[in-house]
Image (spheres, rainbow, N blue to C red):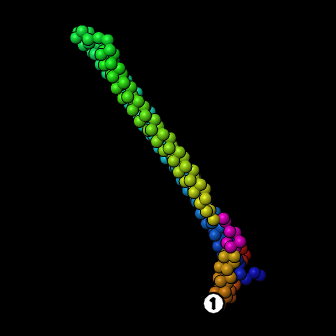
Amino acid sequence: MCQPLILISSLISAATAKLSIEGQEYNANITKRNVELAKTAETERVSNEQTALNLRKIQDGITDAQLIQENDKRLIQAEATATVSAGESFVGGNVVSAKLGDLELGGANANFIIEQQAKLRGQGYNQRFKDMGLAYRNNIMRYDATPIAPVNKGAAVLQGLQTGLNMYAVGDKAGLDTGLETLGENLKNIFTIGRA
């Protein structure tokens, strides 16, 4: 007959090992899930940031186009006013041509400044997009490098055996083996009497 204390100690060993393995697997799965969630959140964050930056770039382009259109409109109005004024004042020739040339030059300079500012802003936007891409790549690499502890079944089994042996030693020292045998015999007798 198997000694009850050995049986109980073996069951405790097996249960401890099983729970340890399950706990390690659970922790590894949680870490993997958290890494995937972090990567998804990072992708969404960068996507939202790029969308906002694209919208800002488009808005700036529209504003620049409107400014150039307003400058062109003012230039046309100023040229028309200068031509009419010159005609009313009986001024013509080189004076009118010089005045119109000055107006065109002023309008062209204003448009050139707007275009140069737009070009510089565009370069700034491009650099920000590159920086976003680098930061995204670095964050994803950092998430991928997150250590995920492997399941150590050998250590779990050893831990279970140690727990079972400790349980057996304590029980044996306390004399539980004899008490458990007596309890087992008494239960056996009870069930045997009930069948008779």
Please tell me in which quadrant of the rendered image residue 74 appears. top left
* Count of picture labels: 1
Q: Is residue 181 above or below residue 84?
A: below
Residue 157 position within the rendered picture, expressed as x and y whole percent measured from the top left: 70, 73
Q: Is residue 45 above or below residue 111?
A: below
Q: Is residue 174 magenta?
A: no
Q: Is residue 170 above or below residue 119?
A: below
Residue 112 position within the rendered picture, expressed as x and y whole percent measured from the top left: 41, 30
Residue at screen point 63% across, 65% down: 149
Residue 179 can be seen in this image: no
- Residue found at the far left of this picture: 89
Which amino acid type corresponds to the residue marked 1 in the rendered image?
Ala
Task: Look at the image and tell me in which quarter the C terminus lies.
Answer: bottom right
Residue stretch in magenta: 150-157
Q: Nearer the viewer, residue 47 or 84?
A: 84
Please tell me in which quadrant of the rendered image residue 115 appears. top left
Residue at screen point 24% across, 13% down: 85
SS under mark 1: loop
Which residue lies under the disc numbered 1? 174
Q: What secondary structure prevails in the magenta region?
A: helix
Q: Nearer the viewer, residue 51 or 177?
A: 51
Dot 1 crowding, Cα within 10 Å, few <14, some 14–19, many 20+: few
